[in-house]
Image (spheres, helix red, strand yellow):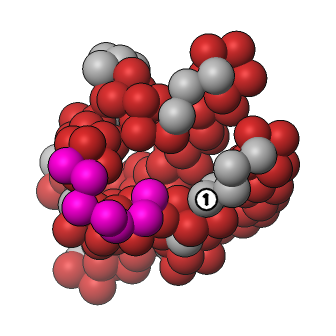
Amino acid sequence: MGFAAIITGTMGCGVSIIKERKLDVEECKEWMHILSIVENEMAFQKSTLPEICLRISKQSTINKKKRDFLKKVYIRMQEKTGESFGAVWKDEFIKHELGKDCKKEMEEEMMCLGEKMFFEDISMQQKVLHTTMQKIDYYMKKKQKENETENKVVLCMSVMSGLLITILLI
């Protein structure tokens, strides 16, 4: 029974590491979802960026942290303090600690998105969104490929460490 408990425990550690690795991919998917909504809102509703942030903040499919972030961007833009959308976006991104949920490559891309989108021309904003979505998609696919091979190694190593511990205890 002790052998089974050790193997189960070490496998559980391996599975938890694998779940952590999947969080990066999930974070990318959520940002892709948000950006696709922004793009659709721009194309069909002809809404301003703060209004789009408010609409997205009301959707339950997005996690609470990002909804709060988007709502705060809208509120600060309505205060009309003279701050640019990019500055508000970046400041709130940092305040809501959204960067800690994603890797450095993604963090920089998403933090600076507000500044990149500050064009008056909607078609330019859509191009920036499209380019950002392509970068996120590339990062997400790269991460999924890395995870496939590394997850097998992690699971194998967790089982092997359980076997090693069991052998040392015998």
Is 15 placed left or right of 145 in the picture? left
From the top left corner, tell me how far across and down residue 58 is, in percent.
Answer: 30, 20
- The image shows residue 119, relative to residue 54, as above or below, that is below
From the top left corner, tell me how far across and down residue 121 is, in percent.
Answer: 76, 46
From the top left corner, tell me how far across and down residue 148 is, in percent.
Answer: 71, 55
Task: For mark 1, give the secondary structure.
Answer: loop
Magenta residue check for 80 = yes
Q: Which residues are magenta?
A: 79-85
Q: Nearer the viewer, residue 64 or 93?
A: 93
Return the residue at label 1.
118
Seen at 53% across and 60% down, the residue is: 114
Is 92 placed left or right of 138 in the picture? left
Seen at 19% across and 49% down, the residue is: 79
Amino acid on which the number 1 mark rests in the picture? Phe
From the top left corner, tell me how far across and down residue 153 is, in percent.
Answer: 62, 68
Residue 33 visible from this viewpoint? no
Residue 64 visible from this viewpoint? yes
- Mark 1 crowdedness (10 Å alpha carbons): few <14, some 14-19, many ≥20: some
Q: Nearer the viewer, residue 113 or 120?
A: 120
